[in-house]
Image: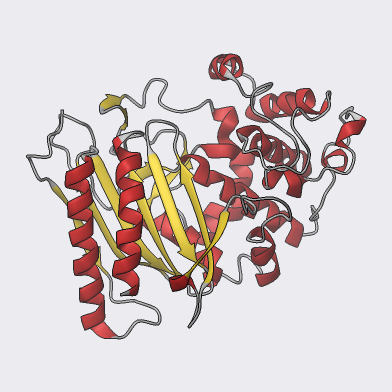
Amino acid sequence: MFSTRRTLLGGFAVLPILGGLPGPARARSVGDAAATALDSVFTAAAPPALAAGIVTRNGLVWSGVRGVRRAGGGDLATLNDRWHLGSNTKAMSAAVFGRLVEQGRARWAMPVAAAFPGLTIDPAWNGITLDDLMRHRGGLLDGPVVNRAWLMAAHADTRPLPEQRAELARGVFSAPPAGPVGAFAYSNANYIVVGAAIEAITGEAWETVMQHELFQPLGLASAGFGAPKGEAPWGHQGGVAVDPAGIADNPAALGPAGTVHMTLADYAGFIGAMMGGAPDWLSEDTRRHLLTPAVGDPPAYAAGWGIGTAPWAGVGEPGPTITHNGSNTLWFATVLAAPERGLGVITLSNDGVAGQRACSSLIPHLVIAATA
């Protein structure tokens, strides 16, 4: 077991690009403060590894990593390692749907019946749209469909993934919504169904569409699906390493809700794009639609993003924030960003318990470092 008595440094980098922040001296100050915070939180929370970054619309401006790829081993985590993002995948699936809207292949407020013209859909779903599902307000709950029995069966299912997702959608829409329509109820099933809709619209697997519409246009060369294999950190549960050659992630059919992995730098590229850094990839209208929460009772949740407000997030006044956590219980990822200011922070860990403590604790320290 890795001990915090052994301080293992995986390295960190400070890049001289701090959009809106003055000069190299400022960059060094930000980097020093962020590195000190990373050291402190890593020592206190003791995950196997902890990575962090400060990002602008242009990508990473500071990044650091501490610890080892596998508890009990000496193989240091590096800035080139891939990290499992869990439910932070949801914002990517929503962005890909936004790309289809821009191409005229889909539309906002698309009724579920229009997305699945071949299915027999219970009349209680009339008026419910894919926007509702992406915002977790369509009455779709995990319990009846994405439960322990489904997870176990899906791990053993050898059918093509689009076929598996289409079957789940068919089961969902054959009965009325299990939850109250319009009320927020976070559910992985929502995004599995959104993935199935993307497949029905395009005729291609969600994984293929992700490659064509997100990974390739943004140059996210490290992106993939499931627990990263090869030269990469292992996920941990309670400090125990889990071999990615076995069952080290949710079943692949859950992909649109949470199986993407990539490097910290590539994830920062996506976050930068969601703050407006890639207007050729995603128009301003589309981006704003994706970041606009549903009208209704709290919490404020948009298409794969929790929405808040913070004093530091605006330009001269408080502004909106976007945030999300992701975990498959073996990894943990957190992002908090201010689109109007073009500034965000990311934390990643290869442990679902100590990693959650570390990622959550480090976020406010990185914000202070980036905005002081």
In the image, 193 versus 46, the foreground residue is 46
Task: Please count the marks in the image.
Answer: 0
Q: Residue furthest right?
A: 123
From the viewer's perspective, tell me whether residue 225 is left or right of residue 3. Answer: right
> Does the rendering let one see residue 3?
yes
Name the quarter where the C terminus is drawn. bottom left
Image location of residue 63, percent across then percent down? 28, 60
Determine whether 31 is above or below 23 in the image: above
Residue at x-position 47% and y-position 63%: 337
Q: Residue at x 25, y 57 (%)?
A: 64
Q: Quadrant of residue 199?
A: top right
Query: Can residue 57 be seen in the rendering of this structure?
Result: no
> Residue at coordinates 75% horizontally, 35% vertically from top-left?
139
| Between 126 and 279, the one nearer to me in the picture | 126
* Residue 160 position in % (x across, y down): 64, 25
43 and 166: which is toward the camera: 43
In the depicted structure, whether residue 155 falls above or below residue 201: above
Quadrant in which the N terminus appears: top left
Q: Is 217 situated above or below 30?
A: above
Report which quarter residue 335 is drawn in.
bottom left
**Residue 350: % across, % down:** 32, 38
173 relative to 108, above or below: above
Colour basis: secondary structure
**For the point 15% across and 33% down, which residue is it?**
2
Query: Farthest residue toward the left?
Result: 5
Residue at the front extreme? 297
x, y percentage for residue 46? 20, 39
